[in-house]
Image (cartoon, rainbow, N blue to C red):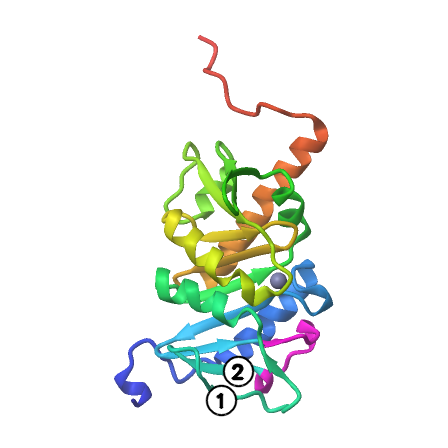
Amino acid sequence: MSQNQNSNENPNENIREMVSSMCQNFYTLGWVSGTGGGISIKRGEKIYMAPSGVEKEKIRPEDVFVLDRQGEVVEAAANPALKLSECAPLFQSAYDLRDAGAVLHSHSVNVVLATMLAERQSGFISTLEFTQLEMLKGLSGHGYYDTFVLPVIDNTPRECELTDSLRAAIEQFPKTPAIAVRNHGVYVWGKNEVQAKTQAECIDYLCEVKVKMHAAGITNHLQSAPVA
Ligand SMILES: [Zn+2]
């Protein structure tokens, strides 16, 4: 299919460069240090994905893998030593089940700390709840008075082993734009890379507030009715 036939592709944008610069940005935020985390962007029928196990701040555009919608590699990284991200099947879950346009995986300390406060609901799923916080408005389908339920699945020794529980959580919580992983991090998606990034920033912020509230001993932040 030529680019002209596919309205989702713009020949002037360089998705490989976008992945590489987002990796640098997330490294600065501390979300992908120590080779962790990952980034992927979908355009048309192609999925662009950062490689695995490398310093994310040093990824060059030509190091980005390109996959088809079935998850098969159609363009490998220029450096043959690079491997496809272990997150690939997890990213694929959000593309398949939520029609996402981009999926990010962060090892944000704020999210990791917040998952330690999550309450177990059933099996491998715990939840964190957020309400009456301005930054909730940055999450699709959520307003200030809504309750955002962030599912937290149990971690596994290998990242790819999370796939089944991540898919189950996505199906069980249709409103969430993210699934956190206990003591590990979070997968966040959006209709495109901008929404995935801003939602990841909002979730990081909300988790930081929760953790700092807990540390400060604040147990109730809900607004009381105005005094007449
Ligand atoms: Zn991870």
Query: Where the C terminus falls, by quadrant?
Result: top left
Task: Return the residue at label 2.
Answer: 65
Residue at (48%, 67%) from the top-left corner?
91
* Secondary structure type for disc 2: strand
At label 1, the amino acid type is Glu
Instruction: Please give the count of numbered marks on the rendered protein.
Output: 2
Residue at (46%, 15%) from the top-left corner?
226
At label 2, the amino acid type is Phe
Does 62 sit above or below residue 133? below
Give the side of residue 75 with respect to residue 117, left or right: left
Give the side of residue 49 with respect to residue 144, left or right: right
Give the spatial CA distance, label 1 vs label 2. 6 Å
Q: Nearer the viewer, residue 13 or 176?
A: 176
Please state the extent of the stretch shown in magenta in the rendering.
Answer: 51-63
Q: Which residue is outermost to the front?
A: 123
Is residue 191 located in the magenta-colored stretch of the structure?
Answer: no
Q: Are marks 1 and 2 in contact (CB under 8 Å)?
A: yes
Please provide percent x and percent y for residue 185: 61, 55
